Amino acid sequence: MDNIHRLLKRQIKIYLHDIKLDNDFQTFIEAVNQAYINHDKERSLLERSIDISSKEYNENMEKIRMLQSQLIQQEKLAGIGQLSAGVAHEINNPLGYVQSNMDTLKKYLEKVSSFLSTLSRVEKTLETDSDANLQELFQIIEKALKENKINYITEDLNDIIDESMSGLTRIEKIVKSLLGFSRVSSLEFEEYNLNKGIKDTLAVANNEIKYTTKIIEDLGDIPYIKAAGGAINQVLLNLIINAVHAIRESSHEGVINIKTFTKDNFVCCVITDNGKGIPEENIDNIFTPFFTTKPVGVGTGLGLSIAYDIIVNKHSGQITVKSELGKGTTFTIYLPIQHHPSNL
């Protein structure tokens, strides 16, 4: 028999080397040999199929990761885009009076320059005319002092500088807060302070909040953790803006309570609003992608699903929700203090 399978050849050599095979047994051996050959072909096809499937799986997983990253970035940009007008107002307001103060300082500089010119002329007169009338020169100086309001300028300068510094500090705070959302390393795990993340988020969202909602902060003494700061800030922004929107749809004064503390091996953040609340039938769906109760064109339905993914899948944390219709909603975030990050 030609083309005997290597395994069958070895088995024949071991067990049947001294046995004479009749025709029926020879037929049986040929059938076994063909089964071995068919098995090898099928295994080869299966292995190729597995290789192709594994390659396709890895490619699809990479596409999913890229799509997920794009969705997170798009949701982040959408959130910042919604707040951009408010952020611009928050910057323009202090920038406006800084610019106004610069105009005032320019006018003051002209008056001080005029007064110094008068002093220079008096000085030259004293140098060239030893018989100059000191009383007249003093009157010239006094007149220039009054006309240019030098005493008022010197008193007002401190206020102008203090006000300008305050405005620039406000602008600096807003810009630094924005960097927490836009920096390239926002998906990298690093030392992160949840309290600072909350303050940065509130600074960015201030114009959206301040007209309808009072913020009550109860930020505890919590440790730094390893986290993707930009991603966590995005979660905070989504939850706070959702709370503001829920409050706007109610008829009473809005209050958002934000509390942080440690519990077991977690740092925790509780965000409670007194907005309209979530219907019980929607509670189980709020973390589902594209689920939204907002009108068409308002929101993407991705905010809370991305928040869930960031907290639970990427940080091995937890996010829970409790709500009562007409009374408000509470979201609680748990972030592990010690954590080995998964791929973001």
Image: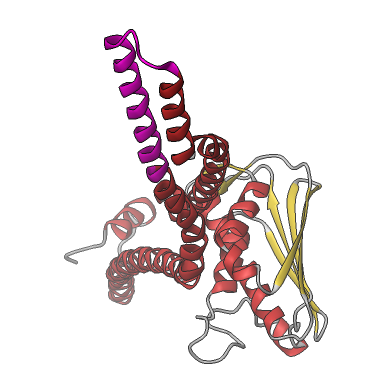
Asked whether, in this view, residue 97 is left or right of residue 245, the answer is left
Q: Position of residue 162 (x, y in %)?
A: 57, 40
Q: Position of residue 186 (x, y in %)?
A: 47, 51
Asked whether, in this view, residue 89 is left or right of residue 287, the answer is left
Question: Which of the pair 308/278 is nearer the observer?
Answer: 278
Say which residue appears at 66% left-offset and 49% top-offset. 194
Q: Is residue 16 visible?
A: yes
Q: Is residue 343 visible?
A: no
Q: Which residues are magenta?
A: 106-134
Say which residue appears at 51% left-offset and 38% top-offset. 153
Say which quarter of the image contains residue 11: bottom left
Q: Is residue 85 above or below residue 259?
A: below
Asked whether, in this view, residue 142 is left or right of residue 111, the answer is right
Q: Position of residue 248 (x, y in %)?
A: 68, 82
Q: Is residue 169 above or below residue 202?
A: above
Residue with the most extreme top position: 130
Say which quarter of the image contains residue 32: bottom left
Say which residue appears at 37% left-offset and 51% top-offset. 14
